[in-house]
Image (cartoon, grey):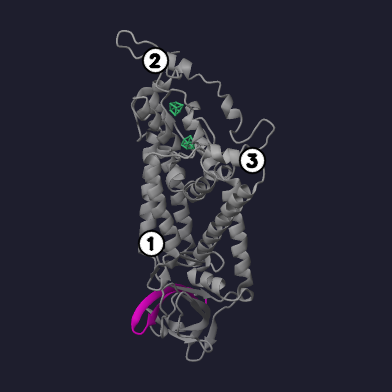
Amino acid sequence: MNIIDELYQDTEEYRDHLATVDKKGKRVWMYPKKPSGWFYKVRTWLSFVLLGLLFGMPFIRVNGEPLMLFNVLERKFIIFSIVFTPQDLHLFALAMVTLMLFVVLFTVVFGRLFCGWICPQTIFMEMVFRKIEYWIDGDAGQQRKLAAAPLTGQKIFKRVSKYAIFYAISLLIANTFLMYIIGSDEVLKIATDPIGLHIGGFMALLAFSGVFFFVFTYMREQVCIAVCPYGRLQGVLLVPDSIVVHYDYVRGEPRGKIQKLPTTNNQAPTAQLGDCVDCKLCVHVCPTGIDIRNGTQLECVNCTACMDACDGVMEKVNRPKGLIRYDSETGIKEGRRKIFTTRVWAYTGVLVALIAVQAFLFATRSEVETVLLRTPGQLFQKVEGGYLSNLYNYEVINKTGQDIPSIEFKLVGAPGGRIKLVGDASTIVPKQGMVKGVMFIEMPENKLESRKTKLKIEVWSNGKLVDEAKTNFLGPVK
Ligand code: SF4
Ligand code: SF4
């Protein structure tokens, strides 16, 4: 066993408990020190962009359609202004599989990069709510003092203003969240019309805002540690080559305070020690309360706060930055970074194939879909003139943002065949809607060559072919 293995032969006792739970099982409230540094600055700017997108997107319309809508209630989905209906379920299912695979692949290579930089929970918690908390309550030490202080007028004022702002933001998030479900117009109506007109929507807004308030005021880091399924998956997704926020124990150990000993032979006074000066700043800034020097842990959301803190310390003690950095276990231990392992290539191959299939299905997806099914339980009937007739139910689904007027059905490649619509059939298919109806298809009996004849029906609108459907025509056994 070499010195590094010996040094790193941790008891791993820290894995037996959570930093946010004490021995009695009580929650330990986190007071992370305010982070600062290059990564925090970049993350702040990125979060502004992402928050702008999140709050702005419900108001963006292309051809009258919102950019994104996930209306699970009406089973209507719009992604980049393309309308998806329940008939596109296969596309959704495939997109979900592709997304899952992407998440796995991305995590194998880059660990929890998503959590630190993109995840809405981290962005809202660290870049919105936590910043407000620092602004009102002060940094970690002041927050601790305030929490322990008796209930004075100042404490009440701080608490009330903080929670009022927290609730206002939660309400804003709830409104935005609802806009992604029912659309911005509907939410604006709920906000401006009398409450009685939209009691359901109003209750939904109250419930969502309550949940967000609870999450960002009380749950906080527990969402990432105990609730988020992605976080729980880390244990099976991460490999020694995954790039994560990592403490360079080769460089840092043995850790110890800087000693002011006299120098000899131009040797640094603390040459027998590693670069970690054991200041614990990396622990104090961590929003999940862990010591990253213990190694990769489930609680680490890769927020980079410890990297910034440690870089600041390294600068002060005149040592190279990056003692805590993005690296892999292999990179730290052996000094090499191997991103493209066999597993990564295999995942990438499957992922590319899935994306190609998805792209093909998207490209060939029709905006009008016609479903034509023979009415169950009905056999053919003989009608005048030597014709046989079959009864069909049809549906024409319009996924576009415009009405489709004057639709008509044409039988193709079936000489002598004809279509008769039943009743007062509507010939206008409303935008993002459908028409249903019943039709007879009649075929001359002497033209049928077998019991089952394949038929093709074209759907036309104002002289333009919009879709086609296939079905079978049943006749007597030949
Ligand atoms: S901030 Fe850097 S130097 Fe300080 S304890 Fe953490 S790893 Fe060591
Ligand atoms: S260990 Fe570092 S990167 Fe991980 S959560 Fe704590 S501060 Fe963020």
Residue 356 at x, y percent in the picture: 35, 53
Of 365 and 100, nearer the camera is 100
Mark linked to residue 362: 1
- Across and down, in percent, residue 243 comes to 40, 35
Q: Under 8 Å from ligand 2: the CB of mark 1?
A: no
Residue picked out by circle 2: 270
Start-end of magenta stretch: 451-476
Residue 44 shows up from this direction: yes
Residue positioned most to the front:
153
Q: Nearer the viewer, mark 3 or mark 1?
A: 3
Looking at this view, is 370 or 277 the one in front? 277
Let me know if residue 471 is in the magenta part: yes
Does the image show residue 475? no
Q: Nearer the viewer, mark 2 or mark 3?
A: 3
Residue 412 place in picture, x, y as percent: 37, 79
Residue occupying the far top of the picture: 265
Sequence order check, earlier mark of 1 and 2: 2
Cα distance between the residues tagged 3 and 1: 60 Å
Mark 2 → mark 3, Cα distance in angstroms = 41 Å
Asked if the residue under mark 1 is in contact with the one under mark 3, i.e. CB atoms within 8 Å, the reply is no
Which quarter of the picture shows residue 454?
Answer: bottom left
Q: Identity of the amino acid at label 1?
A: Phe
Which label is found at residue 335? none
Q: Residue at x 44, y 40 (%)?
A: 107
Q: Give, as a three-letter code, the residue at label 2.
A: Thr
Task: Identify which amino acid the numbered label 3 is placed on.
Answer: Ala
Horizontally, is 300 left or right of 460 in the view?
right
Front one among 393 and 446: 393
Secondary structure beneath disc 3? loop
Residue that badge 3 annotates: 149
